[in-house]
Amino acid sequence: MSEESLLTRFYPFHDLPAAEAQALVDEVRAIVAGDLAIESTQLARDQRNQGAIVLRGRLLRPSHDVFPRWLAELNRRGYTPLLRPEPGGTAEQVALHVLAGVATSQPSNYWVNIVLFIVTFISTLFVGMQSSDSGASLNSVSDLFLPQNLIRGWPFATTLLGILAAHEFGHYFAARYHKVAVTLPYFLPMPLTFGTLGAFIRLKEPVPDRRKLFDIGVAGPLAGLILAVPLLFYGLSTSPMLVPPPPPPGQESMVEGNSIFYYTAKVIIFGKPLPNAVTGEDVLMNQVNFAAWIGLLVTALNLLPVGQLDGGHTVFALFGEKARYVNRAAIGLLALFALASLPPLQRLVPALEIVGFQGWFLWLALIFFLIGPYHPPALDDVTTLDRKRRWIGYLVILIFIITFVPVPMRTL
């Protein structure tokens, strides 16, 4: 999403007459006095993109100390500031754009969140019930809808929704801590495959600066992992290791993919690499194991370093505009994995079957047409991360590397 589309999503901006814009210059000068050594001012021609006025100068104090007060003062007067670094200037050289308008926040309808959660819980019960370890008696299609069978999917449903809820409430409470308006989580039901398309929260206003953007972005995956990792080890320790029986004639069996972390976890629990290429042994996932594996997969997908995914927030907060190089590298890697799934290429290079996955074509479409490949700047795009946040950011990138699954599912 571009900066222009992001801002118009939140703000009913309007143009100021020249006389009002000139008066605004004096008002802003008074607000930033002592914080910004103003070198030039101008009335912008394209007010909706540049702001009603633009002040250029040199910061006298760190932006993370002064911008919150500027934002509060100007919002109270009906204006919104954007702080941008001056291209080619020093770290202190900045441009302050002031737009006429403030963010409008529509009240949330909590019943939507509640109904979606209930429907998603039922759909995950439906998927968990069909697990081989559920004990449900499924002899006909009508048995799929019996409450006594449906409830047997509770280990899968509670494990998966617990991980997703921890992830989304991590974002939610981080946003509330930083006083950024946000909705409660929306869960998305899907009664096939995983039982859900995941969950999301929606910010009701732009994030003020990179530090708050970083905190909100990383809080979700870190909170989800705190729950997913122990549940994965519990699920593995209670799942049998065996040689899977062949699927019935005319049917295919689905096998989960290995990330570095999941592969290592199986070695820790079972003392050997799985699946075993010689004996054919592998873990037969029970409901908790399967749900925790999905939770880790969702975490890795959210940590893809593109657009406004959690990973996109992280790399943009870390590297600013240079994050575009990371975005392009990630998109290029997904494109290679997608192309590697094409049968003509696999016939030429059979080894491509190991890393080829056609699902990445869908993700590439989502990135280019819905998510956007690049991250728009925060209101204050000058503030950088402190050392503690930078190290946490590098840890989050490492988490993405070890949880990413090149081929999430394959058929046998």
Image: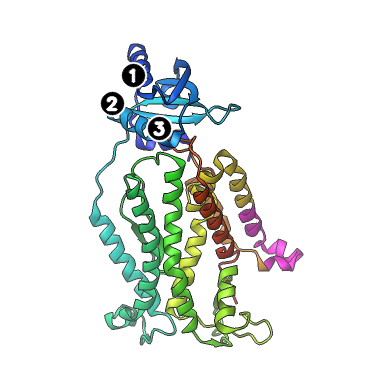
Q: Which residue is mark 3?
A: 66
Mark 2 or 3, closer to the camera: 3
Give the vertical position of 100 relative to 222 (above or below). above
Any part of residue 193 in sight = no
Give the alpha-carbon distance from disc 2 to disc 3, as whole Å. Answer: 17 Å
Q: Which residue is mark 2?
A: 77
Image coordinates of residue 167 in percent, x first then y, are 40, 60
Question: N-terminal of the two: label 3 or label 1?
Answer: 1
Mark 2 or 1, closer to the camera: 1
- Residue 345 painted magenta: yes
Give the vertical position of 322 relative to 31 (above or below). below
Question: N-terminal of the two: label 2 or label 3?
Answer: 3
Query: Residue 399 appears in which quarter of the rendering?
Result: bottom right
Residue at (57% x, 69% y) in the render: 261
Give the alpha-carbon distance from disc 2 to disc 1, as whole Å. Answer: 10 Å
Mark 3 or 1, closer to the camera: 3
Image coordinates of residue 250 in percent, x first then y, are 56, 81
Residue at (56% x, 38% y) in the render: 321
The answer to the question of whether label 2 and label 1 lie on touching residues, with beta carbons closer than 8 A, is yes
Q: Which residue is mark 1?
A: 27
Question: N-terminal of the two: label 2 or label 1?
Answer: 1
Highlighted range, magenta: 333-353
Give the alpha-carbon distance from disc 3 to disc 1, as whole Å. Answer: 16 Å
- Residue 261 painted magenta: no
Image coordinates of residue 237 in percent, x first then y, are 49, 83
